[in-house]
Amino acid sequence: MRSNRKIRITALLFLAPTIIGLLVFRLIPIGWSFALSFYDWKIFDTPQFVGLGNYAHIFTSPTAHKVFLNSAYFSAIYVPGSIALALVLAVLLNNGLRSSAFFRGAFFLPYITSTVAVTLAWRWIFSTKFGLLNNALDWVGVDNPPAWLADPMWALPAVALVSIWKDVGFYMILLLAGLQTIDPTLYEAARVDGAKPVQRFFKITVPMLSRSLFFVLILALVRSTQTFEITYALTNGGPNRASTTLAFYVYQNAFVEFEMGYAAALSYIMCFILGLLTLTNFYFRKRWVHED
Amino acid sequence: MKSIRIALGAMVLGAGMAQAQDTTLTFMSWDPDQLEVEKEAIAAFEAANPGVTVEATAMPPKDYWPRLSALAASGDLPDVFMMSSGFVKEWAAAGNLKDLSGVVSDDQLAGYYEGAASVGVINDQRVAFPQNWVAPVLYYNIDMFEAAGVETPQPDWTWDDFLNAAKALTIDEDGDGDAETYGMSLYGRYAHIEPWVFRNGGRYLNADETALELNDEAVNALQFLTDLVNVHGVAPQPQEMEGVRQQDIMPLGMAAMWVDGSWNIANTRSIVGDDFRWGIAQVPLGPDATPDNAAAYAWADMLSVGAGSDNPDLAWAFIQHMVGEGRQASDFLGGKVPAYIDIATSEAWLETDQMPTNKGLLLDIGAQNVYTGFSKNWSGWRGYDSTGSSGMNGELDEVLNGRKSLDDAIEALVIYGNDILSR
């Protein structure tokens, strides 16, 4: 009895650093920020309780609506775009692409490179008059190519493109690991049965990779709502909010306008939407994810 | 008895010295480059106040304001910190700034530019003291003017004179419809637009600064400016120049004129070097201007004492040192005008041996009727720093890029801005 108590105390002592860290740096701030979302608090001023005022303002604000639509548009480009490209690259590498070690490194490199540095390079590439892209388009005969970062129609797709380019290597590695667990005899059997490469891909590769794909889907979905650094360095949310997504809008409200309560309310709405999307994905998981 | 008194006196003095040795004055700045320059002045203050240590930190504005705000929220404001003309009203209203009214004498004030000094008075309380001030000016490329046979900007220039010059300076050498060099460079940002608006008697805000109500003079000025791009083609669309820093366009010789803050003098010197001669002028008075409504656009960078400072007297002494005789002309980089008149009018600051040779023009601007146009949540509705792509800045860029009419942009701006102002 006494030794059991001693064991429990010892266990608690070992757990204490983690529990205290979790409480102080995660759980208490999360709870505090939820409470904050009911206050009007310009951080250097005294907080005023406004009840659901911040939430009501968000739901009626044209700017907030635009930001939510932008976020959905960004996710609609980023999630399928990054997963599809990662899958193609992973399959190519898995099928013995020449110099695959080199390409594996090359595709992964953007993910571990400084975001701000590479984004500035992309900014030069996208420059309207002096950029590599528009000069290349001009060279192949395209008249008046777009002002990629200054045109509301193109700014958000440009941010999404750079985000895909930056993250695709990471997703590719995850999918490549999944591909390498697929039993090669399945492909041999299918080949013997006369299955064509496309059939083998959709009937074997995709189902056998579905668990990895599901994991990547959830990751990509979460990351798509958190885009910040690339937006900040590439377009600053512009032109005229055309590329402002939710995470960037939270930042602007919290650290430029110092509207902490409003920013907290936005964060909780983002959290709610993300939770809903993740639950929806888990609900539909059984329809397409192949379990062993 | 005498020896006892001496011993007691020595103990008190010792205690005082020990206390003085423990005194640390905290100072926070938004300009790391400026702080490097200020280290000598800070060391001089420490030398003049034995036992006092000044703990100075600096970070760029995008980090400075969140950090300072967090310190205010936790009640740990520095003893002395830089305060912007744009935010001083909100900070004073929140009770974060010590009232210095009682300690600043009229004699002391007489040594400073009145316009700059007045910005730090909120509700009859002096809550900030100016260190330097800045003002947007018209930069112009003298060589381009001479090559085009156009007279350089004159004090009595009208907006028509300016437009005619801009037309003559817009040159399409190969006749492909795209000018190689433009007469003017223009974006929707505050330092590009407001000098014209205020010099035309324009105002964006109502009298108590609680709502956006653009007067006719402001709308006329905005129409004139947006027409420069959309009607006259004497300035490039902002989207055409995407990828080039706006402050580099004129210094790189792509445009002959450009209006922006005097703080860009240092950058312009650095880029232009000896490539061409350039000067500065005041933005011409607008057609709607009257002596009553026309105003120069200028604002001060100031120093404040934290409301909860444990060393308010020492903090004020430090401010006096940092804004006045304790400084040298070389401490004020480029177009930052010292608020202390003796330094600003010195040959060392006027730098007539380098371009622009007429830097004294800034002093004339400071002597005029000055209006800042700042209000609560100004950065939000105007579009500044990390919100620079939105607000009025974003709307005007839409007009300059030919995607929106000015009327539609103003309508959208008023809705957006009033929403922000109502928070």
Image (spheres, grey):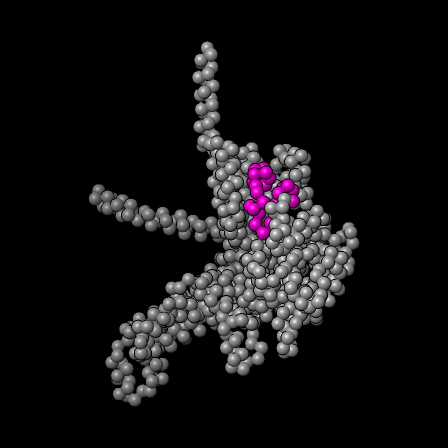
Q: Residue at x 41, y 72 (%)?
A: A83
Q: Is residue B270 left or right of residue B232?
A: left
Quarter location, residue B381: bottom right
**Quarter where residue B149 is shown:** bottom right
- Nearest the viewer among B244 and A234 is B244
Considering only vertical position in the picture, is B109 above or below B377? above
Q: Is residue A277 left or right of residue B161?
A: left
Q: Classify B118 as above or below A236.
A: above
Task: Look at 51% across and 50% down and name the residue there.
Answer: B33
* Depth order, front residue of B42/A98: B42
Q: Position of residue B241 (x, y in %)?
A: 58, 68
Q: Is residue A51 above or below residue B53?
A: below
Magenta stretch: includes residue A99: no
In this view, which residue lies farthest toward the bottom?
Answer: A194
Residue B202 in sight: no
Q: Along the line of sight, which residue is nearer the eye, A23 or A177?
A: A177
Q: Which residues are magenta?
A: B319-345
Give the camera-side residue of A52 and B179.
B179
Q: Measured from the top left, where is residue B226 in percent x and y?
A: 68, 66
Q: Identify the residue shown where x is 48% and y is 31%.
A: B50
Would residue B187 appear left or right of A103 to someone viewing this image? Answer: right
User: Is residue B321 highlighted in magenta?
Assistant: yes
Q: How many marks?
A: 0
Residue B86 rendering spot, x and y as whole percentages: 61, 50
Q: Is residue A213 visible?
A: yes
User: x, y (%) of residue B414?
Assistant: 67, 60
